[in-house]
Amino acid sequence: MAPELASKSVKLSTDLPLDSGQVLSGVEIAYETYGELAADKSNAILICHALTMDQYVASDHPITGKPGWWAQSVGPGKVIDTDRYHVICANVIGSCMGSTGPASLASDGKPYGMRFPVITIRDMVRGLVGLLDGLSIERLHTVIGGSMGGMQALSLAANWPERVERVLAIATTARHSAQNIAFHEVGRQAIMADPNWHDGDYYREENSPDNGLAVARMAAHITYLSEEGLTEKFGRRLQDRDAKSFGFDADFQVESYLRYQGSGFTQRFDANSYLYITRAMDYFDLAEEHGGKLADAFAKSRARFCVISFDSDWLYPTAESRHIVHALNAAGAPVSFVELSAPFGHDSFLLDVPALDRVMKGFIDG
Amino acid sequence: MAPELASKSVKLSTDLPLDSGQVLSGVEIAYETYGELAADKSNAILICHALTMDQYVASDHPITGKPGWWAQSVGPGKVIDTDRYHVICANVIGSCMGSTGPASLASDGKPYGMRFPVITIRDMVRGLVGLLDGLSIERLHTVIGGSMGGMQALSLAANWPERVERVLAIATTARHSAQNIAFHEVGRQAIMADPNWHDGDYYREENSPDNGLAVARMAAHITYLSEEGLTEKFGRRLQDRDAKSFGFDADFQVESYLRYQGSGFTQRFDANSYLYITRAMDYFDLAEEHGGKLADAFAKSRARFCVISFDSDWLYPTAESRHIVHALNAAGAPVSFVELSAPFGHDSFLLDVPALDRVMKGFIDG
């Protein structure tokens, strides 16, 4: 967690009104850009990130040193071609990579902690629209997002319809299901049960609630992968040993992998941000915001839509994408929809799926 | 946790050799019986319990006061008719309701804690066979089990083929998958991350690792229910409020339900038992025990088998039951197999599924 790591940052010129009725002042949005903005500003693509991602979509992560989370798809000559497009990716509010979140300092000079207001997906998009205003970008060529990024893309299209021409929503949903909420609640309870959490006021303590955050990450991580993918990748294979230890070490490779995912995550993510962002996702119900009918959310949209799901994604299964597509159809919006076959589960949108590249490129460039 | 609550208990006359190579001495097995044992002892049915269940299959639970976990199916005139059969249900070793487990006293007069040996499903069955020996019951009319109980039923049939005539395995598997292991590992990490766990040595402390155990239970509980079942039962309905609180209370019914499941569980279950029993389940691979070929596990069996799965069970999906059935077919064992349609997910075996009753009754009485 290092809020000062963002390479670029703007301070929004106005306060951010939130869905809760509260107002967030002095909002900073940290972002990265790639490629040149055309003189007529017609080539701007906004990429919205998922729960635990950040603005480093195509540049090395400043903490882990790993390549950007979508570096395979974003860059010169790549699917999202930065020789043609001006790509913007910003850290959402509530997160911990430079945009205002629970680790930021409140007006009293102390970290917000749990005094940070509960935000929604629409509030995150308010922050992104504030950034676009700051960059004087009136209208996006395309907004793209997978998972929570897809929620933001849909929210932008629904609530700021004049700001976007193309909407690409991948492996996402228009509302969190009971099972989605349940998994997030397990993660939140794991964090809040960690005595180092201190009701969210741990920033000046020696220890952070890393154990709870790691458990939260482990539980969530299982939902990002498919049962088949886990079986193929790990099966019942043992980790660096020939026989079971008859103990509680990580005998199985899948245990070792999960522990690694959990502990690695705590190096780069803030537990309070995890609470706030999962809450925003659980609160997300795009239909509810628009009188209960999802089609009405898209009534004012003039954008073209592309919706992509993966057959092995059990977190946001294809039925959720179909639900979005039906609403877009009912709203008379132009939409193409494809369910791709990929073995990786929800995380397929981050992995090497050639068909995804082809569909994305066709839609963006078309 | 109250190891003295068992209404009946036997101390095994011999030490229990374990799969780990260790030996467990002075083993107590706590059990309940229902119905009269016939003079020729031909009517004994052994019911094997699941991970968090116990011997109170058809009698009120001594801690919670709730009816036995299968009281709807076991009793006079019921599907498992105690007017006809002598039903035995014993707490497995490693558990915490009277049979020897990590909360029991070791030879030094102190609770085992993590000094308790890691056990396997076959070790649990060794304990059950020891009980049958103690009761002078040579041969069971039927062994029945759902989930982990089904693993025990299959293990008994495979390893003590002369002890059983009919085997009824419900919503179970012959081996834990990578995903099964992953969910259990999350639970174990949640328990071990709880500072009240004290490396398992918490029995004389003021507090137990209840927070960790509750998180473990919550994560597991999601896997016991189907996505559809959760949606039907809770959807996105709010708990005792008209609008979202924009806070971290249990706004959604599903959150409230999960928290209740988690906290209620800690009243009646021991965290170390949860570690040991989940470990036993993760280690379970019936084929591996028999040279790698599941059919070979049943080579000596003369029993009739009935295998039942549920279409909404994603913990042990129908494919796992089919895998068992194919092995039984290959071994030449008589087997009937049915996938039942029920909306409740894995927990369907514990709930009101009339078709399950009919299939069970037909098999047991037939």
Image: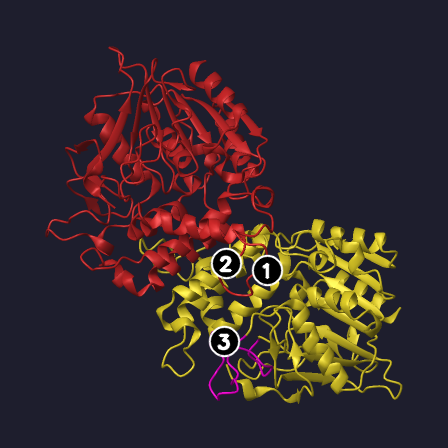
Chain colours: A red, B yellow
Under circle 2, the secondary element is: helix
Q: Which of A26 and A65 is in front in this view?
A: A65
Q: Note whether B196 is above or below A234 in the view shown.
A: below
Q: Note whether A36 is above or below A186 in the view shown.
A: above
Mark 2 — on which chain does it sit? B
Q: Which of B358 and B35 is in front in this view?
A: B35
Q: Give the range drawn in magenta.
A: B95-116
Q: Nearer the viewer, mark 1 or mark 3?
A: 3
Residue lying farthest to the left in this orientation: A108
Residue at label 1? Answer: B282
Give the numbered dot on residue B185.
2
Name above or below for residue B334 compared with residue A169. Answer: below
Q: In which quarter of the image is residue B81?
A: bottom right
The amino acid pointed to by label 1 is: Asp
Note whether A130 is above or below B144 in the view shown: above
Q: Are marks 2 and 1 in contact (CB under 8 Å)?
A: yes
Q: Is mark 1 on a helix, strand or loop?
A: helix
Task: Confirm whether residue B250 shows in the render.
Answer: no
As drawn, is A320 to the left or to the right of A117?
right
Q: Where is residue A218 in the image (x, y as percent from the top left)?
A: 44, 52
Residue B76 placement: quadrant: bottom right
Dot 2 or dot 1, earlier in sequence? 2
Whether label 2 touches label 3, CB < 8 Å: no
Residue at the location (30% across, 58% down)?
A209
At 35% from the left and 69% from the top, the residue drawn is B195
Percent of width and height locating residue A68:
35, 31
Q: Name the residue under label 3.
A: B115
Foreground mark, 2 or 3, reads 3
